[in-house]
Image (cartoon, rainbow, N blue to C red):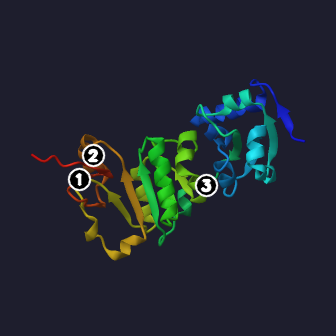
Amino acid sequence: MDEKITSRENAKIKYACRLASGAAFRRTEGRFLAEGRKLCPELARGAELETLFYTENALEKCPELAALPGEHYLVEDHVADKLADVGTHQGVFGVFRTPVHTLEEVRPGGRYLALERVQDPGNVGTLLRSAAAFGFDGVILSEGCASVYAPKTLRASMGAAVRIPVIETGAMPQAITLLREKGITCLAAALYQSQPLSAAKAGYTQSVWWCNVFSDADQRSRSSYTWRNGQSYRVVLADCVTGLLVRRKHHS
């Protein structure tokens, strides 16, 4: 029989809540909190699950939770409410060890996505999921990016945060310099001072694709600094499309 936690002030619950709310605390502890009946088992395939919390209702709906590794605790509904990042939750929460990857793992011949100051957790999570789906070998994040292991990012990544190596580095220009010294081709995705993607050489499929998400004004002001000494490309879209959003044409 799993131990039951009935108090919201339980030390393990308070610790898990701190992991959910603080990026600095997550870095110091080397752990993160995730929630979801599907997400926690998925993350357990690529990260060490230390502690699993679930409600009776969650265990009834998903009995396979009992087979997951780590310490298991049954929690009352009001305790689960405290652990939850959103109002409506599934009653399953896990504390995982954070996988650690460094720039030393990046090798010529691989394909990597580098994100510079992408601040929205949903965007970071979606890009992680896309990189994993397209078979990239890793993702590099600069300072200023949303935390990979924040609850919103984890939900958007749908487990990709541990399925693909994620390398958190400092300033991107210095990281790109180190990669170039290792003989790795680095290409930038940019709106300005760039060529159409069709102009890229076929051999560039094995490289680091370096992109960021700025406002148009920020891109214009930073492009001369950020992309200097590099080659940058842009995806040319049809006239009726802006980004990934369809723009309706107005007819007179």
Rendered image quadrant of residue 27 = top right
Quadrant holding the C terminus: top left
Residue density around tag 1, few if under 14, some if 14–19, many if 20 or more, within 10 Å: some
Mark number, residue 65: none
Residue 56 rendering spot, x and y as whole percentages:
79, 38
What separation in Å lies between label 3 and label 1 (alpha carbons)?
33 Å
Q: From the viewer's perspective, tell me whether residue 244 is left or right of residue 38.
A: left
Q: From the viewer's perspective, tell me whether residue 133 is left or right of residue 18.
A: left
The residue where tag 1 is placed is 192
Q: Amino acid at mark 3?
A: Val
The residue where tag 3 is placed is 162
Q: Secondary structure at mark 1?
A: loop
Q: Residue furthest toward the front?
A: 252
Q: Is residue 49 above or below residue 119?
A: below
Q: Is residue 46 above or below residue 95?
A: below
Q: Is residue 203 above or below residue 116?
A: below
Mark number, residue 219: 2
Residue 209 rendering spot, x and y as whole percentages:
39, 61
Residue at figure coordinates x 67%, y 29% from the top left: 81
Residue at figure coordinates x 51%, y 56% from the top left: 129
Kindly tell me whether residue 114 is visible in this rendering.
yes
Residue in the foreground of this view, choosing between 82 and 208? 82
Quadrant holding the N terminus: top right
Q: Nearer the viewer, mark 3 or mark 2?
A: 3
- First along the sequence among labels 3 and 1: 3
Q: Nearer the viewer, mark 3 or mark 1?
A: 3
- First along the sequence among labels 1 and 2: 1
Rendered image quadrant of residue 72 = top right
Q: From the viewer's perspective, tell me whether residue 194 is left or right of residue 59.
A: left
Whether tag 1 and tag 2 are in contact, CB under 8 A, the answer is yes
Whether tag 3 and tag 2 are in contact, CB under 8 A, the answer is no
Residue at figure coordinates x 37%, y 54% from the top left: 211
